[in-house]
Amino acid sequence: MPNVAEPDPQPSAPIEQPGCESAALLLPGAALPTCGARAESTSLPLPFTRSGATRARWALDAGMRRVWRRAKRFMPDALFLCLSHWRHVRRWPNLVKPRTFNEFILRRCLHPEPQWSMLADKLAVREFVKQRIGEAHLVPLIATPEVFDRALYDCLPNAFVMKANHGCGYVKIVYDKRQTSYDELKRLAQQWLAEDFYRASRERHYRAIEPRLYFEQLLLDQSGHVPADLKLNMFGRDANGEPIIYAGIVSDRFGTPHGDVFDVRWNRVDVAVGHYPQSAIAPPAPPHWDEIVRLATRLADGLGYVRVDLYVPDGKILFGELTFTPGAGVFPFHPDRIDYEWGRLFEATLDNEKRSGRKYFKQGSTV
């Protein structure tokens, strides 16, 4: 096994349940209702102090949620996505002539490009990243086991991250293995590998990804914290050739998180990041912002709209993932006008590709 520097013992992080990391701006930690049963609210007893009307409304909502959980298993994908969009965005989507960002994403969920399965596979995409921007920008792997057994667990370093490759939110951070048992990790790994991520959100390109478990080096900055990860929404280039980028970042996401969104010149824009409040003072641009933009643009070249996730611990730029259907088309924007503005940007990327005659990256291509 590769040697990995072990940080000072720290409390083990709680399990991060598979959630909605694929949301357009959301980073791990906030709750969005885009991932099927895992995102549904659980039933909790109401305090006796609540009014009868409130209890009645809650009972009705709980009943509707139960009906939804049962019915959605039998719904065709298009109906499921349209109803999910209506539930969370409060509009019936137009899939024939999409106008909003969410509508374009819904259409992508139903009509994926074949290469997205490979590029959304968090293990398979590493070769693409190596070809595009170099191996130095990949988070070091510790193991990609066929089977997770006690022998492998014993060989793992004291600190690591356990992940699965076939969806979003499959992340378990271990700061100190002595505080995390083999049995706990084994149960979690079995749960992940048994889940069909496509069935949860109906993003069809996930169907072709074979679930795999893998272990990465734990990234910590000089202060001992997990670094923020940048989620860069890439909309191609404007008429002057400048990249059109909206980057979401959550600061202190395992403490008191705040979320902010910035344009390509690191000007903060008025868009909410999930349920996180904006920072009182906008965080400064990460080190080497121009190089981040260059690398993200290189990764996105030929892919149309894509969200590129990067980690930047102490100025080092490392790849996270590529996401083609962030939010699964049911992400409510705040303010709502951004859904339409980003829809126009999305449509412009399609028009630019048609006018230029450029070909998208195809399966089997290296660059």
Image (spheres, helix red, strand yellow):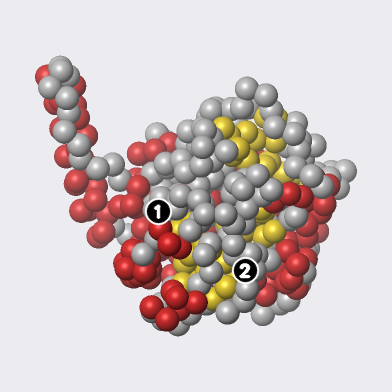
Q: To which quarter of the image does residue 181 belong?
A: bottom left
Label of residue 143 in the image: none
User: Disc 1 vs disc 2: Cβ atoms closer than 8 Å?
Assistant: no
Label of residue 15 in the image: 1
Q: Earlier in the sequence, mark 1 or mark 2?
A: 2
Please state which of residues 271 and 317 is positioned toward the viewer in this rendering. Answer: 317
- Is 161 displayed left or right of 284 in the figure? left
Residue neighbourhood size for the residue with mark 2, other residues' Cα within 10 Å, grouped as few (<14), some (14–19), many (≥20):
some
- The residue that appears at 36% across and 69% down in the rendered structure is 182
- Is 191 displayed left or right of 105 in the figure? left
Q: Amino acid at mark 1?
A: Ile
The N terminus sits in image quarter: bottom right
- The residue that appears at 70% across and 32% down in the rendered structure is 283
Q: Is 57 located above or below residue 257 in the figure?
A: above
Q: Nearer the viewer, mark 1 or mark 2?
A: 2
Circle 2 residue: 4
Q: CA distance from mark 1 to mark 2?
A: 22 Å
- Is 62 displayed left or right of 304 in the figure? left
Q: Is 334 located above or below residue 300 in the figure?
A: above
